[in-house]
Every structure is written in structure tokens, then in C-alpha cells.
Amino acid sequence: MTTESPVKYELVHVCKQSGARRGILHTPHGSFETPVFMPVGTQATVKTMTPEEVYALGAGIILANTYHLWMRPGHDLVEEAGGLHQFMNWPHAILTDSGGFQVFSLSDARRISEEGVRFNSHIDGSLHELTPELAIDIQTSLGADIIMQLDECADWQEDHDYIRGSLERTLRWLERCARQHKNTANQALFGIVQGGVYEDLRKMSAEQTVAFDLPGYAIGGLSVGEPAELMYKMLEVVTPILPSDKPRYLMGVGSPDYLIEGVIRGIDMFDCVLPTRLGRNGTVMTSQGRLTVRNAAYARDFTPMDPACSCYACQNYTRAYIRHLIKANEILGLRLTTWHNLHFLINLMSEIREAISRDELLDFRDNFFSRTGYSKE
Amino acid sequence: MTTESPVKYELVHVCKQSGARRGILHTPHGSFETPVFMPVGTQATVKTMTPEEVYALGAGIILANTYHLWMRPGHDLVEEAGGLHQFMNWPHAILTDSGGFQVFSLSDARRISEEGVRFNSHIDGSLHELTPELAIDIQTSLGADIIMQLDECADWQEDHDYIRGSLERTLRWLERCARQHKNTANQALFGIVQGGVYEDLRKMSAEQTVAFDLPGYAIGGLSVGEPAELMYKMLEVVTPILPSDKPRYLMGVGSPDYLIEGVIRGIDMFDCVLPTRLGRNGTVMTSQGRLTVRNAAYARDFTPMDPACSCYACQNYTRAYIRHLIKANEILGLRLTTWHNLHFLINLMSEIREAISRDELLDFRDNFFSRTGYSKE
């Protein structure tokens, strides 16, 4: 790659206690501190929130899903609107995934081949094929600052042979993605390390992905049901191979314990639907652990969801009121639980960054886990 | 009534062209200008909005529904929370209805008697009876600044005999409400003029209701399907009988043409679910008339819902984006259409007040109708 990357990682501090790193990621749509949690705006909106509310919470980057926007309203329409930033009124950084993960998880009867993946739309059943080239073309239309290669996120329980074949195909897909990617001045293509839960395959995938000299690297195929210890082990194998001057993104991770353990193992970026999805189900993450505010136990509880929290929802509303809203199917209830959960994770990342700067991230982890019980979930 | 009223009407100006009046209503939770449109917060929330957003739009008073809050979460719970203002985080004025209208329109198998109305809950079918005394007790628990008597909102197509009997019972219910109402220092009880579409009955109801010397008067049983001309005629019969030093509230009216024609006939207060309900159905009121933004025609329309509008939604989002959100069942879509519609009506009332001050309300009406076509709906 001869063009200068549109995305640059600036190292700020390495925690002497944990080895975790604090930095700043510079993108064409602003800079933000890392480690960072990226709220998910699947369909060009972070569910229930306005862009201003998301930004005010401290988010400098969000993730949008290529598969969903391709299916509806269509990437050509988004391009006609001036790209995703303008379409959704979010002038800050955006990352789009390749669409592959949703093809594997949402669509019916997917058929994978060397060429790509054939599948039926989850909306109308229509037949489509996602190839590495199309994944890049769609993401070019959407115009995110960071785009992802098409990969196969294989079931972690597949055997060594399958995973090896899968990651080799993912590497060949990366080559095709890199060849198709022309808008290198404005969009940074990240490669994805796969390899299941096999140390040798993770190592092989990491080394061969890094050989592409990309502006950033992701780790996929983890947090998909495997034991936490296996995930941590894979991170310990992979991150030392990834170049220290590039950002590292652990895909689909958003539980507090995984975030902290991921940062300790050298991860800079995370995304997950957990805070928004939990919120819409009436559950919130608090300084004392999870709380299902829609439960009858809180019908006459006139305290905030989290008395220790400084978010808008906790400063202004009681558990009793929010429970009433959720029971009565009122949208404000979902807004408040979502608002709180996003605040919780974004605030957690801020505390993690401060603990890195103080060289105390391991202490922070131990205190956090003993206080919240999150490591035992 | 010997106690001084907690709600006071201050006259500011009478339009020389139309006779419409501009004023200020002072309540225990703040003052606001009239004529006013009151957004409806049925279940202790203006659907999709935060209280701060509603207030920022210019609303100084909202309406909440006694029936809904009685059924869920229960008025005792709201009282325990410190009253409705505190429960829902709305420190400004609130008006509650008596619950009667919802009993008549929502519940199954209602049986009306001199004592009150028996009905089955729309939530769980449980049997309840709403009496004038209970309507006051519930509203005392909720703690709104303005509370309403229990009345019967009879079908406008009922015959003269039925309507006469109904309004006489409504007057007897008013007497029982006034006797039950003890918190006169903090809550103002309004009487309701009924009488269907019969001039003599409207006159009789107005005269006998005014005899109670209440802090304000409402006109009910209109905008329930009768021709607009009949409604206007009834207003012309009733408002001259109502005292000029008390506020006049036309219940359940919120279409732009009815608001303007109501003000011209001396009305100060209005409420309606129209802006919020229309918005949730993907339709918005604009300076050019109604627009159903979820229609396919707007899929690639990158202009605002109303190019002439200064609201948050129109300043930041296109029809194409809002249509996408609504088609994709995204809550932000409903927030934006609701936001716009509330802005539209609140802004309309502000323009009406200015037209009153300029003594040009009839000109304003003619210009507005020819521009928007709203009078022809």
C-alpha cells in the first residue's frame, strides 16, 4: 500500500501494570480516544437515540451494518444521499462491517463457495450473492471511514481442518478485497484474523493477514459461545503478532468483563449490540451488576436505576417510572434504558483509559469485578 | 367558592378584527401564553419525547389521562411517587381529564347510571366503577394543576331528550365533584359544558355550569364526528356565556383549522392526540398540507419533511432518511415525525397569538387556509 492511510493510530501510554495501551485514533471524520466502545447503529441509527445524544455520551465512532443497509434502503440510495454520514446526520467516524456476519447469522439457506456467499434476504427472501468485491463496492457507496474485508465467521466448534480451510479462504477473500478497494485515501480497509479456538491457526491467520500491511486489524470469530478462557488465550496468541502502530479491533464484544480483559490483552476497539438490545428488553447494567428494571420488584422503587450513575436517565427518573413506561409500551422507557446502558459502557471505557494512564488497570479490573460481579456472569 | 383559585387568567389583548383573545394562564407550576395547544401525555409521557424536549418546543402545559393512570400504574403509586409532576419529571403545568371520556371510548360494556359508570378495564377486563367522587379522588392523587369534572360525552347524534337528560346528570355530577374537591388551593376544578349540537341545550348547560363559579370552563362533546359548521355554531352559542376572566378549554381539538376557528370563537386552550398519533403513523403536518413521509414517493427525496420548518427534524433529516427509519421500524423515525408535528402545532399557536396582537387573525386564517389547504380536509 503506497497511499498514506486515512486512519492513524497514535499511542499515548502503555499501562506498566497490564501492558494495555491507551491511544488516539485519527480518522477523516474526527479523532477519538482508545480503547473505545463503538455503539452499533445497524440500520443507520443507534436504536432509540439521536446522533447528538450518542455523541454527547462520548462516542466518537459508531458501527453500521452493511448487510442491513444493502437490503434496506439500499447502498445506492445511501450513496445518492451523500453517503452514510450525511444520510444519518452523523458527522463523526463510522465503521461498517462487511455484511458477512449477518449473512451467516440472519439469512436463510446460505451457500458458501470460493466465489462468495449466496443467501436469501431476511426481509423478502430474495436471492443474493455477497462476494469480496461486492462487500467492498457496497462499503464504498456507504462511505464509512473504516471498512472491513469479507470473512467467514466459522462456528468455533468446527474441527481443525474446516477452520484451516475457512481461514485460508478468508485470506484469499482479503486479497480480492484489497484489490477491489480503490478509495484508499478516505476509507481504511481492515483485515480480519480468524482461526477458531486453535492457537496454531490463529497464529497463521494473524501472520498472513498482517502481511497485507493494512491500516488496522480485527479479530473475528470470538465471543460466539466459546468459553471465556479460550477467547482470552486466542487474544494472547494474536495481539503480539499485530503491529503496534495499527489499531486492533475485537469484533462483537461488549460485556464489561470481556471489554476489560480484551483491553488488558492489547485491544483498542470493540462493538456490540448488547447495551442497546439489553435496554430494549428492560435490563440495565449498573455499578452493582445487572438490573431488570421491568421486574415487579421495582414497581414502587423510587430510586434511580443506578444511584451511582450520572447519566440523564438516572439523574431524572426512578425505577418505578421506567418500569411503568416499559409495561405500558412507551418508547421513552426504551430510550432511557438504552441511554443508560450506552452511558455505562462508554463511561467504563473512559475509566479503563484513566486506569491505563495511572498504570493500574489490573487493580481496576479486580475492583470492578468484585463490585459488580460481572466476571461471574 | 371562597378560596382563591390556583389558576388565574390574565387578558393581554383582544383582536380587533376577530374578537379572539390573547392571555396568560398562571398556575402553581408556571405560566404560559394562551391560546395554547396542550400536548397529550396519556400514560405520564408525551409519546416518544422527553419532558425537556416537549418544554423546549414551547409547551408550558401538557394533558395526562386519568383513566390510563388509574388503570396503570395506579394513582396511589403516582401519589406515592410524589405526584404526577415528580413521577414523570415534568415540573410545568399539567391538566388531567376526568377519565370519563376513555371509559366511554375504550372500555367494554359500560353501564351508565346516576351513581356513575361501570365498565371493564381495557387492559385486563376487570370491573370498575367511576363516580364523580372517585374521579376527583384519583385526580387529587395525581396532583395536576387543572382537573376536570366527570361528565358524559354523549354521541352527538343522540336526540334532544337524551342529550338533555345527559347534560342534567353531568350538572349533578359537577355538584358532587365540587363537593368532593378539597385541594382547592393547588388544583383548579373546571366544569364541562355539554349539550350536543342543540343550541338551547348548549345555552342551558353553559349557564348552569357557569353558576358554579369555577376557575375555568371546558366545552366537551364536540369534534366527535359532527360537521365543522355545527361545532362552530355551538362555540358561538357557548363562549359568550362563559365569563371573560376565566380560561375556556375546547376538549379534544387539534387539527389546524379547528384550532384557528376555535380561537376566533373565544377559546384559550386545546388538546389533542392528533400530532403524536399522526406522527407515529408516518404522517406530518407541513406548511404545504399533510405529507405521508413513509410513502414510496419519498424514498429518494433528500429534502426536509417541511422545507419551511425550523424544527430539529426538518433542520437535520431528509424525507428519504425518515421514510427509511419508519420502514425499518426504527424508533428515531417516530421521534422525528412526532417532534415535527408537535412543533408545527405549538408554532401555529404562537403565530395565532401574534396575529391576535396585530389584530389580523382573520387575515391570518385566510392566508393559512389558502396556503395549506387545511380547511378543506
Image: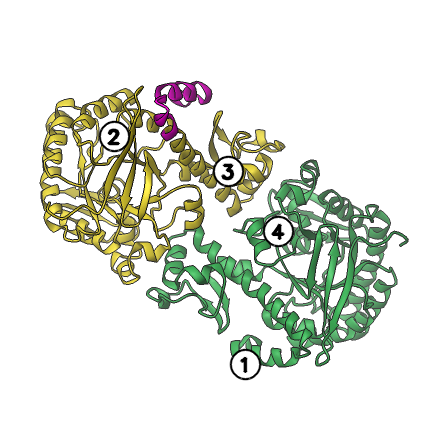
Chain colours: A yellow, B green
Q: Callout 3, which amino acid?
A: Cys
Within 10 Å of disc 3 (Cα), the crowding (few <14, some 14-19, many 20+) is some
Q: What is the number of the mark on residue A311?
A: 3
Q: Is residue A208 visible?
A: yes
Labels 3 and 4 within one chain: no
Q: What secondary structure is the magenta-colored segment mainly? A: helix
Q: Nearer the viewer, residue B280 or A62?
A: A62
Which dot marks residue A222?
2
Relative side of B171 to A199, left or right: right
Q: Is residue A87 magenta?
A: no
Type of the residue with mark 1: Ser
The kind of secondary structure element at disc 3 is loop
Distance from label 3 to label 4 (Cα)?
26 Å
The residue that mark 4 highlights is B42
Return the x and y of residue A148 as percentages of the image width and height.
Answer: 21, 43
Find residue B370 and name its label. 1
Residue A20 figure quarter = top left
Q: Find residue A200 and name its label.
A: none
Subunit of label 4: B
Query: In the rendered structure, which segment of residues is drawn in magenta?
Result: A353-377
CA gap between label 1 and label 2 equals 62 Å
Residue A56, position as x, y percentages in the image:
44, 45
Residue B201 horizontal/vertical position (percent): 80, 70
Alpha carbon separation for disc pair 3 and 2:
31 Å
